[in-house]
Image (cartoon, rainbow, N blue to C red):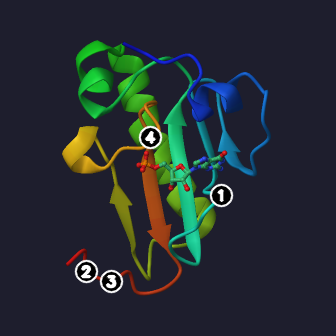
């Protein structure tokens, strides 16, 4: 079940600020408050969904397509397509998801190390 009080829900309701990189009708991209790389951007759909599984199972196709295309738009905007980037989605306990609103991390701007 979706937690209306998660931090990204509050950002979407403009209850707390964020540093916006890109926004459109369905999607919002903003800087991570605790960056793990020189560039660390979070991307979220603007509607209630908990994680990747929830998003793919329940979002309208138009919104799924829009989300992934908006990631490409942000990659272009950040000018990281040539040097590269890493996209991560954490889900659930084993995935280490902290905020229960589906999001992707874009990490770039330096060589991103191995996970282990
Ligand atoms: P998760 O572990 O759920 O995949 O990632 C959650 C991310 O949200 C973390 O990287 C964390 O730094 C970021 N985060 C948590 N609270 C805030 C906040 O209030 N504002 C922003 N911009 N990012 C946040």
Label 2 crowd bin: few (<14), some (14–19), many (20+), radius 10 Å: few
Please tell me which of labels 1 and 4 falls first in the chain.
1
Nearer the camera: disc 1 or disc 4: 1
In space, the residues marked 1 and 4 are separated at their CA atoms by 14 Å
Helix, strand or loop under label 4: loop
Helix, strand or loop under label 2: loop
Query: Is the distance from the Cβ of mark 4 to the nearest ligand 1 atom less than 8 Å?
Result: yes
Location of the C terminus by quadrant is bottom left
**Image coords of residue 38 (percent x, y):** 58, 78
**Residue labelled with disc 4:** 103
Q: Quadrant of residue 91?
A: top left
In space, the residues marked 1 and 2 are separated at their CA atoms by 22 Å
Label 3 crowd bin: few (<14), some (14–19), many (20+), radius 10 Å: few
**Residue labelled with disc 2:** 114
Residue 15, which numbered label?
Answer: none
**Image coords of residue 32 (percent x, y):** 60, 57
Residue 33, which numbered label?
Answer: 1
83 in relation to 59, above or below: below
Helix, strand or loop under label 1: loop
Nearer the camera: disc 1 or disc 3: 1
Label pair 1/2, CB-CB below 8 angstroms: no
Please tell me which of labels 1 and 2 falls first in the chain.
1
Q: Which residue shows up at 25% across the image and 74% down it? A: 115
Q: Out of 80 and 33, give the one closest to the viewer.
A: 33
In space, the residues marked 4 and 3 are separated at their CA atoms by 21 Å
Q: Which residue shows up at 40% across the image and 19% down it? A: 62
**Residue labelled with disc 3:** 113
In space, the residues marked 1 and 3 are separated at their CA atoms by 20 Å
């Amino acid at each position: 079940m979706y937690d209306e009080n998660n931090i990204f829900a509050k950002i979407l309701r403009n209850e707390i600020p964020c540093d916006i990189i890109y926004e459109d009708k369905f999607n919002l991209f903003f800087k991570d408050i605790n960056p793990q790389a020189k560039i660390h951007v979070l991307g979220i759909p603007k509607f209630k969904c908990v994680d990747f599984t929830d998003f793919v199972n329940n979002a309208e196709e138009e919104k799924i397509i829009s989300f992934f295309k908006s990631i490409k738009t942000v990659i272009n905007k950040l000018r990281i397509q040539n040097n590269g980037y890493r996209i991560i989605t954490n889900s659930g306990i084993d995935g280490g998801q902290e905020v229960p609103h589906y999001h992707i991390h874009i990490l770039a701007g330096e060589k991103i190390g191995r996970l282990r």
